[in-house]
Image (cartoon, rainbow, N blue to C red):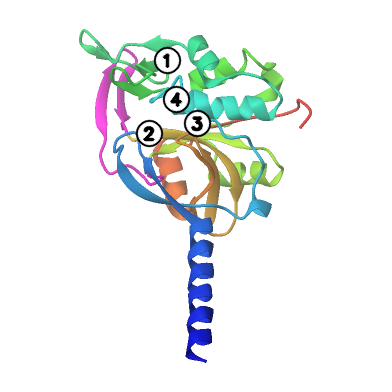
Amino acid sequence: MQRLLKIVTICLLTYLAVSVQEDHFYVQASRTALGKAEKITRSPQNKVIDVSLVNQLTTPALYNGCEVAALSMLLQFQGKKVTKNELAKQLAYTPMHEGKWDGNPNQAFVGDITGKKPGLGVYHGPIYKLATKYLPKKHVHDISGSDFSKVAGLIEQGKPVWVITTTNFEAPKTWQKFHTKQGDLKVTFAMHSVVITGVDARYIYLNDPYGHKNRQVDKKAFIRSYKAMGKQAIYVDGMGK
């Protein structure tokens, strides 16, 4: 009897261990803290839009290229066969620093997108222009400045949304001041871009270009990061989806 009880106990513990492994896995994450182990939670599949994941670290890697990786997901969702690296070649660039001026992410990608040299990133304006090279303008919508409720409404309609957030999906605690030709800007090297694929009462589900499809993150914290980064959002539609 004791032998039978022991066998049942071992089977139960094995089942629980496998169940936990299906819900969580650990990865090396963060543009600013590579090498830090972080727990990732998968989302319930019935709550999200099925958008193919593009990993910015896939060879040839774009270590600072989350914005174009996220855009390629939107374009591929609409049937456009375009890669992150093809988009990177079409993007406008500006030096990180040039003389007394710093680069402006509202004008172009600041620095090196490959990660071989320092890079900051790019904001919604240049990404919108890049998207219109692949889709008619009437199908590309820059809704930057909109409250998150509008983003959530689009997700409910089955339209994934490109946004700017941060690598830990929380509002930045520290900022740097960039002196650009267009004026001073408050920036953070923790900026990150993702595609939102789902929203519910507690969580945001997103395709993270660091290699995580339908990643589940805290909704309140994410919305704070969305607001802090200027409410930058783009979606595309009308191409058969």
Question: Which numbered marker is on residue 55?
Answer: 3
Q: Nearer the viewer, residue 219 or 178?
A: 219
Question: Which numbered marker is on residue 191?
Answer: 2
Q: Which residue is mark 4?
A: 123
Residue span colored magenta: 168-189
Q: Earlier in the sequence, mark 2 or mark 3?
A: 3
Q: Amino acid at mark 1?
A: Ala
Question: Which numbered marker is on residue 108?
Answer: 1
User: What's the distance in space between the residues labelled 1 and 4, CA to CA?
Assistant: 8 Å
Q: Is residue 179 magenta?
A: yes
User: What's the distance in space between the residues labelled 2 and 4, CA to CA?
Assistant: 10 Å
User: Up-down: is 153 above or below 238?
Assistant: below
Tell me: 84 left or right of 167.
Answer: right
Q: Earlier in the sequence, mark 2 or mark 4?
A: 4
Q: Earlier in the sequence, mark 4 or mark 3?
A: 3
Residue 119: image location, x then y, percent: 32, 21
Q: Could you say whether the residue bearing mark 3 is in a helix, strand or loop? A: loop
Choose mark 2 or mark 3, whichever is in front: 3
Residue 39: image location, x then y, percent: 40, 52
